[in-house]
Image (tube, helix red, strand yellow):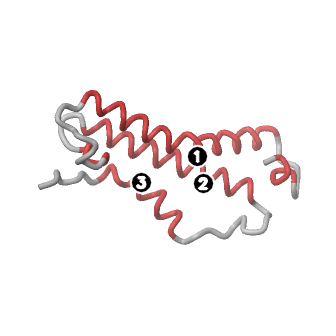
Amino acid sequence: MQQAASTGSAPSEATTKLTRALLACGVVAGPFYIVVGVLQLFIRPGFDNTRHMLSLLANGDLGWIQITNFEVSGLLTIAGAIGIRQVLRGESGGTASHPARPRTRTRLAGTALYTSYPPA
């Protein structure tokens, strides 16, 4: 990161700290989603992770926990993407991105707007 951040104009210390914080958000996003989901397995009676998808935890009285998990994980992922873009600014491919990436990031955060139907 130092090499990529040092190209072009020298970034301020505050900018570097912000970029590192954004990158840390991206690193934490995936494990956060999984840990919160696994913790819910212990408090949700009748939920069987071998038969049900993790997203079905958004249903029921405690569904707000999974909905919040979607929101926080999505926002952390978006923050990580912003950090990656800042690091790669001015580099080859620094502004290019696969078209599906931004949609995927916003879909995770937007998942909280919709609840799943329980399996038949």
What's under tag 2, amino acid-wise?
Ala
Task: Identify the residue at image location x=50%, y=39%.
Answer: 31
Numbered tag placed on residue 108 in the rendering = 3
The quadrant where residue 66 appears: top left
In the visual, does 53 lie left or right of 76?
Answer: left
**Extreme residue in the front direction:** 50
Query: For the residue carrying disc 2, how many other residues have a C-alpha within 10 Å: few (<14), some (14-19), or many (20+)?
Result: some
Task: Identify the residue at image location x=72%, y=68%.
Answer: 93
**Pointer 2 or 1: first along the chain:** 1
Task: Identify the residue at image location x=23%, y=53%.
Answer: 116
Which residue corresponds to mark 1?
26
C-alpha span from label 2 to label 1? 7 Å
Residue 80 % position (x, y): 60, 49
Q: Say whether marks 3 and 2 touch (CB < 8 Å).
A: no
Describe the element under mark 2 as helix, strand or loop: helix
Query: For the residue carrying disc 1, how many other residues have a C-alpha within 10 Å: few (<14), some (14-19), or many (20+)?
Result: many
Task: Identify the residue at image location x=18%, y=35%.
Answer: 61
Q: Say whether marks 2 and 1 touch (CB < 8 Å).
A: yes
- How many numbered markers are drawn? 3
What's under tag 3, amino acid-wise?
Leu
**Pointer 3 or 2: first along the chain:** 2
Which residue corresponds to mark 2?
81
C-alpha span from label 1 to label 3? 13 Å
Residue 69 % position (x, y): 39, 40
Query: For the residue carrying disc 3, how many other residues have a C-alpha within 10 Å: few (<14), some (14-19), or many (20+)?
Result: some
